Image (cartoon, coloured by chain):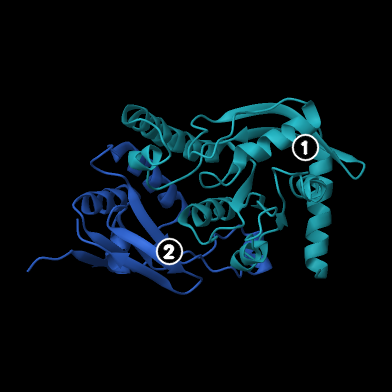
Chain colours: A blue, B cyan
Amino acid sequence: MKGIQMDLISSDKLERLSSVEKIRMILDSVEDGKIIVLERGLTPQEETKLIEATMTKITPGEFAGIEIESYPGAVHQSWFDKLRKKPVDRARLTVIGPADQLKMLKRDRDVISAMVSAR
Amino acid sequence: MGIIKKIRKNLSSAFNKIFKRGKLHRIGIYGPPNAGKTTLANRIVRDFTGDVVGSVSDIPHETRRAHRREGVTIESNGSSITLDIVDTPGLATKIDFQDFMAKGLSEDESRRRAKEATEGVIEAVRWLEDLEGVILVMDATEDPFTQVNVTVIGNMEARNLPLLIVANKIDLDDSMPSRIKSAFPQHPMVPISALTGDNIDVMYDKIAEHFG
């Protein structure tokens, strides 16, 4: 059967991985043409590291980068959380794929609509 | 405003006045490519120093190196704030050299620009760690729910640093700054046109209030 592989990664697995391992896993998979769905989103710091790592992998004509979309994090922090500088909870679903195969159609606070095409 | 929030704000303001007087705040101008970051940086620097920061173009990733302008004093409503302003390359998760060819550049030039653009994004990401606040520029004609916007906002929230969202290009008929406000209601937002200067004084008030 010809198709596109999609890996859905549980939050349990993600919790066991270090940030470096997560980014390596994501980029290796996306470079292979897979679509990755993370049950638990990356932290903001991991997102910037992923962007940085992606830029080093971009090769004109071969790999154009990634498409990544996640829901925005929760917006409600109590004043006590802010006082303690508790980070905003960003544990939300994230979809990542090759930029030339995954196209986001629409996204809002609770819905991501995407189209996946074969290479 | 709740009483506790008021007390905290007053305490914070008093602390800043006592301990941070004269301190330069390093503020980064961030956003996706072609949101109008350099146009805004030029507008701010021109209004208060008479100079400009960089060139602008409708080709994405025109800014491929961060430019810092030190000691820009913004005066607003009788108060003033002195900032180091860092105009950063557009943040992106993908850069396709064919997008540059579609804008009329040669293949060689497009490949070179794509390579430089990737380096620019890395530089912009690294600058995030050295800033004390961010002006996030969004194109008010575009969908605000982009990963770049979510990532920049998330980083500022995680570090508890001030963020001001600027909804740019309100001079265009299809701009919808209200969409940006409803997407990120937890942060202050000011609609402007960096190109025409519409509402720019309100933005200066917000900058003085928010980063002061």
Please tell me the numbered disc located at residue A70: 2
Seen in the picture, residue B160 relative to B17 is either above or below; the reply is below
Which residue of the protein is positioned furthest toward the left in this rendering?
Answer: A1
Query: Residue at the spot x=7%, y=69% of the render?
Result: A1
Disc 1 packing (10 Å; few <14; some 14–19; many ≥20): few
What residue does disc 1 label? B20
Q: What is the x, y in percent for residue B124? A: 50, 37
Q: Residue at x 64, y 59 (%)?
A: B175
Task: Describe the element under mark 2 as helix, strand or loop.
Answer: strand
Residue B131 sits in quarter? top right
Residue A82 appearing in the image: yes
- Mark seen at residue A22: none
Helix, strand or loop at label 1? It is loop
B152 left or right of A9? right
* Quadrant (top left, top right, bottom left, bottom right) of the C terminus of chain B: top right
Q: Nearer the viewer, residue A24 or A60?
A: A60
Residue type of the residue flagged with mark 1:
Lys
Q: Which residue is situated farthest in the front direction here?
A: B104
Could you tell me which chain the residue with mark 2 belongs to? A
Q: Is residue B177 above or below residue A58?
A: below
- Image location of residue A63, percent across then percent down: 26, 43
Q: Find the distance from the CA under tag 2 to the CA under tag 1.
A: 37 Å
